[in-house]
Image (cartoon, rainbow, N blue to C red):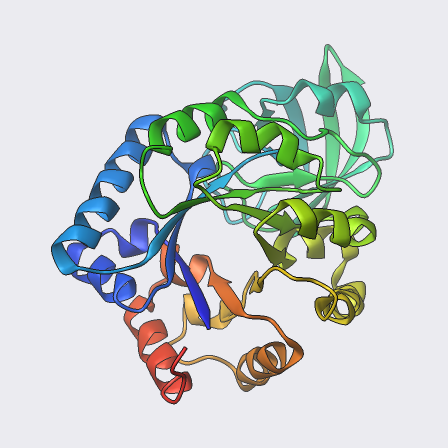
Amino acid sequence: MNRVFTCGPASEAAATLSLIASRADALRLNIAHMTTEKLQQWLDRLVELRRRENLGFRIVLDLQGAKVRIGRLPEVASLPETVGIFYGETSESPGMIPVPTQSVFEKTEIGDHLLLNDRRVILRVTGRAGGRLQAAVEKNGPLSSGKGLNSPDRVFEMARVTEHDAAAIALSKEISDLDYAVSFVADGSESRLFRPLVGVSHRLIAKIEQRAAFSHLAAIDAVFDEFWLCRGDLGAEAGLRKLGAWQADFVKALTGLKKPCLLAGEVLGSMTALPNPSRAEIVQLYDAIQAGFTGFVLSDETACGTQVAAVMHFIDYFFADDQS
């Protein structure tokens, strides 16, 4: 069973990092939330941790690829009733949301919906003035820097290697046992962009985060080394009512795929704040393993949650008989 745990503020303490590393097959770094300097610090720590404690975990760098994210702004529990959206990196006001991706402004039309933070926030575009978009907040919720932005109405970015991705690859490609996860893989062609940069000694992971990829799973299987079914952005596109059906469609395809497939996105989501998982999460995890998923990815549970030690205790308990 392949267990991938995400590093973040909740796992920075030396004792906590050692705890999750001792149970991990891989530790994930989401570079979208890191400066190059911060990424270097994490890489140095993880390489030294492997050496010092003689651990065999792999390191996974989660690259942005075609994923669009907002810029930096104050963290809030909810937004004003109306907001502005502008091209830029930083905002001091939660009522003005920065987006450092020009195609969002080129392609968005009045009436479009913009989904932020895995659909926790839904905006409806109501106007445009001076290059900025105005939007009504149809669903309010928490928002902070670097959260994903997508739309059921538009595809903002085609496959690409961002400057930040290229810098992260250059920084890390000499490290052994290190993989790269590519966001928003659509048809497998993304491999032609990333493989020449990472080389043949590193594995490429395809993050399945959009419905379009379901029609190209065989092609993706041929050129990537692993799949992650990522239900955060996939759920934002599907909506909660359809997400179960979309996951079921992916499960039907599992037997025809040769590469390992991991489940990601709130696998133990309640344990971000609570010391025990819900019964629904336990049953769903069991069902996923029985269906053919070969592992799972924990994100907020180990990156920013308050119950990291409890999560590891549950992993020990749940997989007590697992010898894989």
Given residues 95 and 125, the one toward you in this image is 125
Where is residue 149? Give x, y as percent: 65, 38
Lateral position of residue 73 relative to residue 242, left or right: left
Where is residue 23? Give x, y as percent: 31, 69
Q: Which residue is at a point 63% across and 27% down the rendered structure image?
A: 160
Q: Quadrant of residue 114?
A: top right
Vertical placement of residue 35 versus 249, above or below = above
Does residue 254 show up?
yes
Find the residue positioned furthest to the top. 130
Vertical placement of residue 123 versus 268, above or below = above
Does residue 140 show up?
no
Q: Which residue is at a point 44% across and 58% down the rendered structure image?
A: 300
Vertical placement of residue 54 versus 47, above or below = below
Vertical placement of residue 280 versus 38, above or below = below
Where is residue 161? Give x, y as percent: 58, 26
Q: Quadrant of residue 253?
A: bottom right
Given residues 316 and 202, the one toward you in this image is 202
Find the residue positioned furthest to the left. 52
Q: Quadrant of residue 107?
A: top right
Q: Quadrant of the C terminus?
A: bottom left
Q: Which residue is at a point 22% across and 39% down the rendered structure image?
A: 44
Lateral position of residue 158 relative to residue 12, left or right: right
Find the residue positioned furthest to the front. 200
Q: How many marks?
A: 0
Lateral position of residue 292 relative to residue 17, left or right: right
Lateral position of residue 127 relative to residue 78, left or right: right
Where is residue 98? Give x, y as percent: 57, 25
